[in-house]
Amino acid sequence: MTDKIIALVDGSTYARSVCDHAAWIAGRLGCPVELLHVLGRREGGAGSDLSGAIALGARSALLEQLAALDEQRSKLAIQRGRAILEGAQALLEQAGVTATAQLRHGDLIEALAGKDGEVQMILIGKRGEAADFARGHLGSNLERVVRAATRPLFIASRAFRPIRRVLVAYDGSASAMRAVDHVTRSPLYAGLDISVVTVGSDTEATRKGLDNAKAMLMAAGLHAEGRIVPGQPEEALGRLVTSEHFDHLVMGASGHSRLRALFVGSTSLEMIRTCTVPILLVR
């Protein structure tokens, strides 16, 4: 594969983890990394009109001062963005990865739009700058990217650790099947221990679907095991990740029954919110 991966970096504590995961992924895929930092419209200089109901005589002078402040704020945001990108690029190059940097203005989703044909994966941190210390919340940008991304989305945890054991969530849906197919085709998972897990009742149909998924993985030369566990998906998968020391979770971005609820409406990001390891979402 030669298509690049895009790593979204900001000033949060997750930026280093995004870079470390990007270096690991790029090294295994043999592809370059494009680092992207997007300045919001406010950072880009579109400040609020604070003049309000000010007396006409003072209004002109105040507007000039506000314009100067907006200009200065915009310049500082650009300098900061460039510094973030330079630091990230240095980390990747130290790891032997070819990396380019791009600073964009405007909306993040718009910046990502149109890149599908040249990108095989997008990386983003679990939380952004505003949510660094709010463990019960995720960055608003992450929520938007999860819903808008059409390429596999890798969500980095707070800190990088070597990935050796991978948990693949499988519920028989088309999205879950695509996740399994992605694992079979991607050099990223070659040589890793794979466990494909279905959460729910142990029925003949469930067992047959799980066996098919496991067979696909093994046919690709992967070391894979399969099992069915009871409970609710977000709780059962979280327990498995913690108790059996998995390093990475792969799942479809939508699914049947209870798994579907993880990615729809107000509970759409519960798995991402509670899981302590990086997650790959496959559409």
Image (spheres, rainbow, N blue to C red):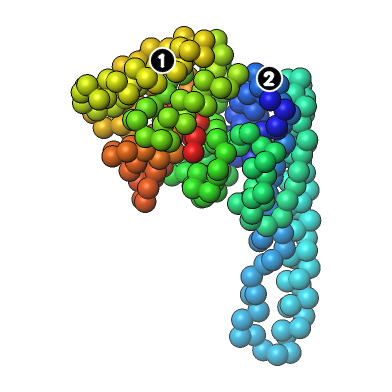
Res 215 label = 1
Residue at 56 percent of width and 14 percent of height: 190
* Camera-nearest residue between 269 and 45: 269
- Foreground residue among 93 and 221: 221
Instruction: Give the image location of residue 240, x and y in percent.
Output: 34, 20
Q: Residue 277, percent across and down?
A: 47, 26
User: Residue at 66% of width from left, 22% of height from top?
Assistant: 29
Say which quarter of the image contains residue 92.
top right
Q: Mark 1 to mark 2: distance in Å?
A: 27 Å
Mark 2: which secondary structure? helix
Look at label 1 and name its amino acid: Ala
Q: Secondary structure at mark 1?
A: helix
Query: Taking 188 as reference, is 91 left or right?
Result: right
Relative to 259, residue 188 above or below: above
Above-or-below relation of 203 to 139: above
Q: Give whichever of 101, 32 is nearer the camera.
A: 32
Question: Do we see residue 21 in this rendering?
Answer: yes
Is any atom of residue 136 visible in this view? no
Viewer-side label of 1, 2: 1
Name the N-terminal-most of marks 1 and 2.
Answer: 2
Q: In the image, is residue 166 above or below residue 4?
A: above
Which residue is drawn at the image coordinates 70% and 32% (left, top)? 3
Outermost residue toward the bottom in this view: 56
Quickly name the residue at label 2. 27
**Where is residue 107 drawn, in percent x and y?**
63, 56
Counting from the top left corner in percent of width and height, residue 2 is at: 72, 27
